Amino acid sequence: KDEDTFDPSRSKMTLRLHMSDIGEARLLPELMAALHRDAPGMQVHTVPLPHAEIPDALETGSIHFALGFLPSVSGTERIELLHDRYAVVVRAGHPMTSSAKGRTTIKDLRRLEYVAVRSHSETFRILQQLGLDGRLVLTSAHFLALPAIIARTNLAVVMPEAIVHRFVDTERYALLPAELPRSTFTVSLHWSRRFEGDPAHRWMRRLFVSLFKGDGR
């Protein structure tokens, strides 16, 4: 059988993926744990590509899959994996957490100053829609520094809620109960139809679905 021609336990392939840095933080821990168990010889290489380059990179095989919220990417095969929403995060003890009992209003949000990550363009769209882009004091290339910056300042960040729940210590940070415009989003797995029948490719698609589909957090 065609499917039996790929044996993950013996594979030495390098899996090449498009992911943002926040996508890496959300998805790589579970993926690497599964590969360590089922395909210990496989290696993983991630690269954040400009979204316009993703379809061609999939078609040529320079990457096997693209994972993320990629609404501008078209012409690919895809499957929805998980749903998330953007949230506003501040440090624990931030003045806004005591003054905003119940619901944080747009007026409240306009009193804050913000940091944002360039790799997550949707956060800029949300800030622009709320008229808050003029309140942006730091634009960072990477997600990694943001929690430490938030913890030591009164700055706020708009980021995926699942990242907050998984990686942010609730004793040091707080979620503001704010309604953000078009804040929900879907993380999808994208690939090229050209490789649809490849046994290794099929095995990887099944693995991603088993690990992440329907995982809201």
Image (tube, rainbow, N blue to C red):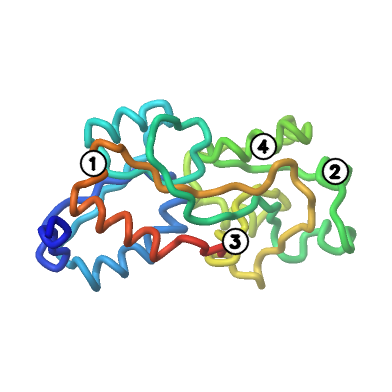
Query: Would you name the residue on which mark 4 appears?
Result: 137
Q: Which residue is disc 1 drawn over?
A: 195
> Does residue 28 appear to the left or right of 69 in the view shown?
left
Image quarter of the N terminus: bottom left
Q: Quick one: 192 or 68, which is closer to the camera?
A: 192
The residue pinned by badge 2 equals 106
Residue sitting at the far front: 1
| In front: label 1 or label 3 | 1
Vertical relation: 18 (above or below) 154? above
Q: Which mark is first along the chain, 4 or 1? A: 4
Q: Pick whichever of labels 2 and 3 is earlier in the sequence.
A: 2
For marks 4 and 2, the one nearer the N-term is 2
In primary-sequence order, the first of circles 1 and 3 is 3
Q: Which of 125/137 is in front?
A: 125
Q: How far apart are marks 1 and 3 (CA)?
A: 35 Å
Q: Which amino acid does label 1 sit on?
A: Phe
Q: In which quarter of the image is residue 121?
A: top right
* Between discs 4 and 3, the one toward the N terminus: 4
Please report the residue visible at 69 percent of the width from the left and 38 percent of the height from the top. Answer: 126
Q: Distance between the residues labelled 4 and 3?
A: 21 Å
Task: Report x, y in % for residue 34.
Answer: 30, 68
Name above or below for residue 58 compared with residue 143.
above
The residue shown at (66%, 33%) is 125
Q: Say which of 20 and 146 sits in front.
A: 20
- Mark 2–mark 1 Cα distance, whole angstroms, equals 47 Å
The residue under the point 34% across, 62% down is 31
Q: Name the residue under label 3.
A: 164
Q: Could you tell whether 189 is left or right of 56 in the image?
A: right
Q: Are marks 2 and 3 in contact (CB under 8 Å)?
A: no
Q: Determine contact: label 1, label 4, CB under 8 Å.
A: no
Return the x and y of residue 100 as percentages of the image width and height.
88, 58
